[in-house]
Image (cartoon, rainbow, N blue to C red):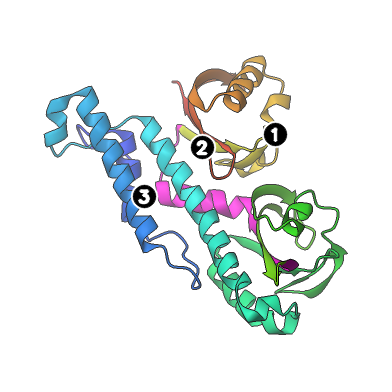
Amino acid sequence: MRAPHGASITCLVLIKVMASPAPYRPVFFRSDTRETMMIKSFLAALALFAATVNPALAASDDCTADERVALSAYRALTEDHLSGVLAAERALAATADAQSADWARIKPALASLARDVTTEAAVWYAMPDGHYYTVDGDLSKESLKDRAYFPALLADKSVEGTLVISKSTGHRSIIVAAPVVRDGKVVAAIGVSIRARLLAAMVAEKTHMPDNLIFYALDADGRTAIHKDPERMFEFPSDMGAPSLGAAVNTILKAPSGSVSYEFRGQKRTALFETSGVLGWHFVLAREDR
């Protein structure tokens, strides 16, 4: 897609984002206000950058912005999707059906949630001893007791953004889960295993980034959570043998935001990055230098 004269690539990315259908909104949770605020933030960032670069452009119809605005848009879309899922889980956790610790009572509501979350691999309901049920398979033969995130749920803490290989589906998944509390005690947990591949595909579809822009996100350990190239997901870029890439990853993990340059498979790249305060992920937007 070619940019019209006077319009930047980032302008086109943001126009596509704002013209696309609204991100996933669970039927249990409405956040029209948050959606409006996110779009207004994009517009404010565009105006601010345009005024900084050339004050005359602020009053014109030309949309000019740098790739950092596109990076913020990509990060916000990802955060908004996962936070929407968590909000839906918390709303369900407050219901009598969820607090009953009875799978038969809560299953219909979770089945509805599963239909709404287009990126899900599994929607599950776990008991404090680790056994759990899924919408597709009812009682699982597996246990969540050995999952690193499970103690947090038992301690009445939500989980958002943990990477796992799903026990029920085998997919590379991102865990979003909320505890269910009754009379001050955790009696269950509601979780959604988001397919990393589908989340990345959603971002790609809504942003329509040009071919020479590569988006990805690293978790706190430096593992790739989502990537424009699905084959790169759940890998550690620092282990790929390119010294400049390893150095770039170290910088990305240590600094809250900034820019780095590195080579990957003989191709020079310049990347912008920023850390998500919501997920603890490090979002990166890289440009292949040609």
Disc 3 marks which residue?
38
Q: Residues within 10 Å of mark 2 (few under 14, many from 20)?
A: many
Residue type at numbered disc 2: Phe
Disc 1 marks which residue?
221
Contact check, label 2 and label 3, Cβ < 8 Å: no
The one of 15 and 81 positioned closer to us in this rendering: 81
Q: Quadrant of residue 115?
A: bottom right
* Residue 271 placement, left or right of 50: right
> Eyeballing the image, is 24 above or below 98?
above
Q: How far apart are the two marked residues, 2 and 3, measured between alpha carbons? A: 19 Å
Q: Residues within 10 Å of mark 3 (few under 14, many from 20)?
A: some
For the image shown, how many numbered marks are present on the structure?
A: 3
Question: Mark 1 falls on what kind of element?
Answer: loop
Q: How far apart are the two marked residues, 1 and 3, measured between alpha carbons? A: 28 Å
Q: Residues within 10 Å of mark 1 (few under 14, many from 20)?
A: few
Mark 2 or 1, nearer chain start: 2
Residue type at numbered disc 1: Asp
Disc 2 marks which residue?
215
* Residue 241 placement, left or right of 248: right
Q: Position of residue 284 (x, y in %)?
A: 52, 33
Tell me, yes or no, if residue 20 can be seen here.
no
Q: Which residues are magenta?
A: 185-212
- The residue lying at 74 percent from left, 79 percent from top is 103
> Eyeballing the image, is 100 above or below 257?
below
Q: How far apart are the two marked residues, 2 and 1, measured between alpha carbons? A: 18 Å
Residue type at numbered disc 3: Met
